[in-house]
Image (cartoon, grey):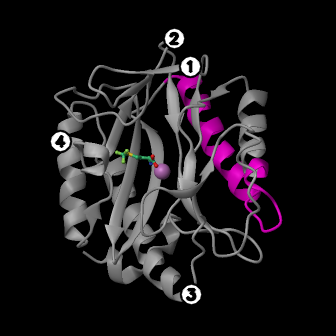
Amino acid sequence: MIILKNERDLEAMRPACAVASLVLSEVAAFIQPGVTTRQVDEFAASRIKHYGARSAFLGYRKYPCQICISVNDQVVHGLANERQLRFGDIVSLDVGVYYGGYVGDNARTVAVGGCGVEAQRLMDVTERALYEGIAAATPGNRVTDISRAIQTYVEGNGFSVVREFVGHGVGRSVHEDPQVPNFVDPKSNQKLRPGMTIAIEPMVNSGRAHVKILNDGWTVVTQDGSLSAHFEHTVLITEGEPEILTWPERVPSSLKAS
Ligand code: MF3
Ligand code: CO
């Protein structure tokens, strides 16, 4: 069942998405060679708390960290530990928060200091694929139109989309209907309607699409060891253009000042 949001819901959901966006930007700026992923997670915890929010991931199906930190061949759901980030790594940061009863969910991949040209191209293509998907998120279109836009763009650039993990509706819960795959799945062909709020989140591998889960039960890695990138926004379907609720420039100055 797809839960449509009315203006009152959105009045509460916009700030939740603003906090998620703000925390993601702050965490991205904290990334530098030498810091451990544990320190990154602790920094995220302090920023989430600072805004009076709560991690939407910690405790979800027993997920043990505040945010997801996935390095290089790690696709999503990477766990914080004593690993030190090194110059040239790429790190995917996924931040979801509860604030005022609603969830904001967003992700981005950043280079640690700098990275190789192929890693940079992977990040650029993945980010651009997200915006191709968002551009298709208009009423009258279907979920498959978002999926097709992403898949076509990614594969046209010689990379592959992960199948096992998908975007999703988001609202009072992190995961609501519908699923939003990054590949055309005829089962996910719901019509898009104003008031739907969805997390669009391409996960893109530089090599083959196949992934596996490590023994920790969470960390998803590429089977072939190739690099992976992940970009995500929470998006509102409107009568017209989609509204990117986690767009950094939407953050109200009342939240920013501190
Ligand atoms: N953004 C990811 C998702 O929507 C993060 C989930 S992490 C989990 O699935 F811990 F909550 F599973
Ligand atoms: Co998500």
What residue would you read off at disc 2?
224
- Tell me whether circle 4 and circle 3 mark residues in contact (CB < 8 Å): no
Tell me how far mark 4 sits from mark 2, CA to CA: 28 Å
Is 162 placed above or below 13 here? above
**Which is nearer the N-term, disc 3 or disc 1?**
3
Residue 229 at x, y = what percent? 52, 34
* Amino acid at the residue labelled 2: Asp
Nearer the observer, disc 4 or disc 2?
Answer: 2
Q: Start and end of the magenta stretch?
A: 116-145
Q: Residue at x 70, y 51 (%)?
A: 133
Q: Nearer the viewer, residue 160 or 212?
A: 212
Q: Amino acid at mark 3?
A: Glu
Mark 1: amino acid: His
* Circles 2 and 1 in contact, beta carbons < 8 Å: yes
Q: Earlier in the sequence, mark 2 or mark 3?
A: 3
Q: Which mark is residue 38?
A: none
| Relative horizontal placement of residue 85, taking residue 196 as reference (left or right) | left
Q: Nearer the viewer, mark 2 or mark 3?
A: 3
Q: Disc 4 or disc 3, which is closer to the eye?
A: 3
Badge 4 or badge 1: first in the primary sequence: 4
Counting residues from the start of the chain, the first of labels 2 and 1 encountered is 1
Judged by its main secondary structure, the magenta piece is helix
Above/below status of 4 relative to 79: below
- The residue to which callout 3 is attached is 7
Q: Please name whichever residue, 116 or 27, is drawn nearer the observer in this view of the structure.
A: 27
Locate the N terminus by quadrant. bottom right
Q: CA distance from mark 4 to mark 1?
A: 30 Å
Residue extending furthest right? 140
Is label 4 or label 1 in front? 1
Mark 4 or mark 3: whose residue is earlier in sequence: 3
Disc 1 under 8 Å from ligand 1? The reply is no
Which residue corresponds to mark 1?
210
